Amino acid sequence: MRHQSILIGLAGLLLGLPAALAQAPGDSGREQLGMEPRQTSPLPLENDTTEPLPLDSEPSATRPAERPGMDLQLPEGWNVASPDDIGEPLQLSVENAVFLALQNNRDLAVQQLEPLIAGTFEAVERARFDPTLFGELSLQRDSVIRQSPDIQQEFAVRSQSEVGEIGIRQELPTGTSLELSISSDRSDSSRTLEQFGSRAGVSLTQALLQGASIESNLAQLRQAELDTLASVYQVRGFAEALVEDVELTYWDFVLAQRQLEIFREALAVAEQQLEETRRRIEVGDRPETEETSARAEVALRRQGVIEARNDRERARITLLQLINPPGAGWASPVETEDAPDGEADEPDPVTDHVTLGQRLRPDLNEARLQVQRGELEVVRTRSGLLPRLDLFVTLGKTGFARSFGESWRDIDDSGFDLAAGLSFELPLGNRAARAESRRAGLDRQQAMEAVGNLAQLAALDVQLAWLEAERSREQINATAVTRQLQEEVLRAEQARFSVGAGTALAVSQAQRDLLESQLDEVEAAIRYRQALTTLHRQSGTLLVRRGIEAPGAEEVVLR
């Protein structure tokens, strides 16, 4: 009975371990980094065939279902109105453009599958500790010619046997290999009576040196979990870059639209000035050479209209590609609802942005995860430097009888088998293990150097972005003053021309200077908005400032 208790206890251990190892992908990696485990996995492994509609597709009456992958929680109250037909203008605010991009952008849909793919490698590594059911059934028939020593005659000895075995085995993180099995056999021959045998046994192999460390045995699983987390940070970084691209393109479209309006107004003024010059030439108030400069100014303004219209179209189709709105086509017109503010607040101190960037930038956190992964590789390869010394124990209860049922009832008797011992193995020189361990140490050192380099580059990017935001902010007031002064200069030249003291060339030059100042003023206001967007992305806070919740917001701290 004591032997039976041992067998039952080991069987319970085999069956109970999978539940203890069943964790959501990435949870153990989050525990290593001091993060809270996910209550529900944001990476459901499920089939999904929903795709965003291409721009040249027919309008859909239903909204596309959410894709699996990165869970992007948008702020409450965000909604977007899609055009009823391809000819109706698409009304867009900055928020709605970002909303559409996060819902429909095809590049983002591709990137969102990366955590799901990485999660499958977790399942593969976790499966190393899953129990394995095995079985075997064999039949054997023999016929042997033998010679009797007594009568010196040959005779045939025929025998037959059937063996069946079933069991379960499992590898444990402790370096233990367990196997529980039951078997039964039947043997019969022309010289002996039919006999049945039964056996229930368990075997245990425990690594004492190489492979005995739990940390080493779980290293590859932990690395797979960190790879899943790293893919989440990659998706977050891509989402931030996408939001930045959408906002920059939106404001490029607003700028191009405003520039087109300014050029059209300037063209109308230039044409009016040309008519005024021709009228004065007809009455003899101006020489005919004055018409040339006025016509040149009209041609220059038409050239500006063509360029501005082309810039607007380029920005429009680029914006449509980024947001990929359902029901829209490449020719769909876009109307913007937001305009740049004339007033600009001073950005937060650059040190605050640098500090946030060091904590929250997805690429930095991903690099820190690579350091963590390298440390696990060092732990794994360090175990390979040790010789392999294993303890093995095999224990079984046996029974024999002339029938199948009696052989199992006889298993409670004193029949048993027991074997124990040690096995040792050490490659001479152990060069492969030494090389792997050295490579793991160098890879970890390289990853740490990469983190330091990336942190320095991140600080540089943040400071350059802050300087650009500050320059753009100061340019807003400066360009406004310049435009006001150029308006006064133009009025003065027009007054001089009306009384015959000025020339058409001077008026054209004043109009050109006013046009440039108007363009500079509009561009300064928009460039400041774009510079702030870039600054927030460089500091890793763009999604947070837009109220978008997404995985990967936690800081990875190296220990």
Image (cartoon, rainbow, N blue to C red):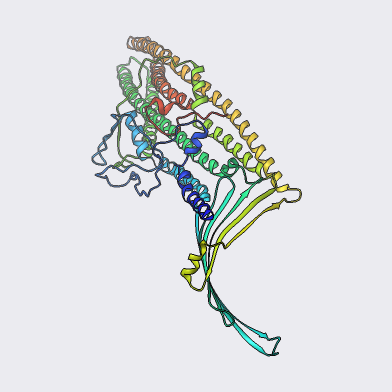
Q: Nearer the viewer, residue 29 or 306?
A: 29
Q: Is residue 184 left or right of residue 296?
A: right
- Name the residue rendered at 45%, 23% in the picture: 531
- Name the residue rendered at 55%, 41% in the picture: 223
- In the picture, the quarter occupied by the C terminus is top right
The tally of labels here is 0
Specify whether residue 430 is in view: yes
Specify whether residue 135 is in view: no
On screen, residue 165 above or below 153: above
Q: Is residue 170 left or right of residue 496?
A: right
On screen, residue 351 above or below 256: above
Name the spot of residue 67 as percent of width and height, x first: 36, 43
Could you say which quadrant of the image residue 319 lies in?
top left
- Name the residue rendered at 63%, 53% in the picture: 392
Name the spot of residue 148 as percent of width and height, x first: 68, 86
On screen, residue 464 above or below 195: above
Q: Nearer the viewer, residue 342 or 490?
A: 342
- Name the residue rendered at 29%, 27% in the picture: 337
Could you say which quadrant of the image residue 445 lies in?
top right
Residue placed furthest toward the right: 429
Name the spot of residue 185 as percent of width and height, x first: 53, 70
Q: Is residue 365 left or right of residue 511?
A: right
Q: Nearer the viewer, residue 105 or 546?
A: 546
Could you say which quadrant of the image residue 266 lies in?
top left
Residue placed furthest toward the front: 413
Name the spot of residue 226 as percent of width and height, x first: 52, 39
